[in-house]
Image: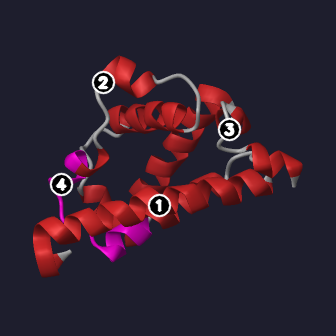
């Protein structure tokens, strides 16, 4: 349990994920699963035809978010999750579909069970906030 306590401190989470190479594998698996899963079709339609750019953006975002290099801002500029997601109505169903794809992608990684659980728990926080922000902007449809 002592190792678990270090997640979120310094670059411990980034290292546990395998650095940028591990995060690139995670993002690649995530978007591959989204592309393959029929139940993720609505979510998949929100992404462009080519998933290479969004996959790189997600890996770069995760890098900084998990305490590693701030690659997203270096490559793509400022990060604004709610503003970026404002272009869509993000409801509970879409959020859960995203989390389901991510949970499956995480399960494919060589992460320790404690880090896998930690990462998915951490991802639920922004997922919930994005749904709440969408609901505030779009009302009953979110």
Given contact means CB atoms under 8 Å apart, are the residues at marks 1 and 3 in contact? no
* In-front residue for pair 124/51: 124
Q: Would residue 85 be counted in the magenta stretch?
A: yes
Given contact means CB atoms under 8 Å apart, are the residues at marks 1 and 2 in contact? no
Given contact means CB atoms under 8 Å apart, are the residues at marks 3 and 4 in contact? no
Secondary structure under the numbered disc 3 in the rendered image: loop
Nearer to us: label 2 or label 3: 3
- Distance between mark 1 and mark 3 Cα atoms: 17 Å
Residue at (31, 60) in percent of width and height: 130
Quick one: label 1 or label 3, which is nearer the N terminus? 3
Residue at (39, 27) in percent of width and height: 72
Given contact means CB atoms under 8 Å apart, are the residues at marks 2 and 3 in contact? no
Quarter containing the C terminus: bottom left
* In-front residue for pair 108/12: 12
Quick one: label 3 or label 4, which is nearer the N terminus? 3
* In-front residue for pair 1/84: 1
Secondary structure under the numbered disc 2 in the rendered image: helix
Quick one: label 4 or label 2, which is nearer the N terminus? 2
The number of numbered badges drawn on the structure is 4
- Distance between mark 2 and mark 3 Cα atoms: 25 Å
Q: Position of residue 12 (x, y in %)?
A: 71, 35
Q: Position of residue 84 (x, y in %)?
A: 22, 45
Predominant SS along the magenta part: helix
- Residue bearing the label numbered 4: 86
- Residue bearing the label numbered 1: 125
Q: Which residues are magenta?
A: 83-97
- Residue bearing the label numbered 2: 76
Q: Position of residue 55 (x, y in %)?
A: 41, 38
- Residue bearing the label numbered 3: 9
Query: From the viewer's perspective, is 83 left or right of 5?
Result: left
């Amino acid at each position: 349990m002592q190792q678990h306590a270090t997640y979120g401190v310094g670059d411990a989470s980034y290292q546990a994920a395998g650095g940028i190479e591990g995060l690139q594998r995670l993002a690649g698996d995530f978007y591959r699963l989204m592309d393959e899963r029929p139940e993720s079709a609505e979510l998949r339609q929100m992404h462009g035809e080519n998933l290479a750019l969004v996959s790189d953006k997600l890996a770069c975002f995760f890098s900084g978010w998990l305490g590693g290099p701030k690659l997203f801002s270096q490559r793509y500029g400022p990060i604004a999750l709610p503003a970026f997601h404002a272009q869509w109505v993000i409801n509970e169903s879409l959020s859960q579909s995203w989390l389901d794809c991510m949970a499956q992608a995480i399960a494919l990684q060589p992460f320790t069970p404690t880090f896998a659980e930690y990462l998915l728990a951490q991802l639920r926080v922004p997922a919930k906030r994005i749904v709440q922000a969408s609901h505030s902007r779009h009302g009953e449809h979110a």
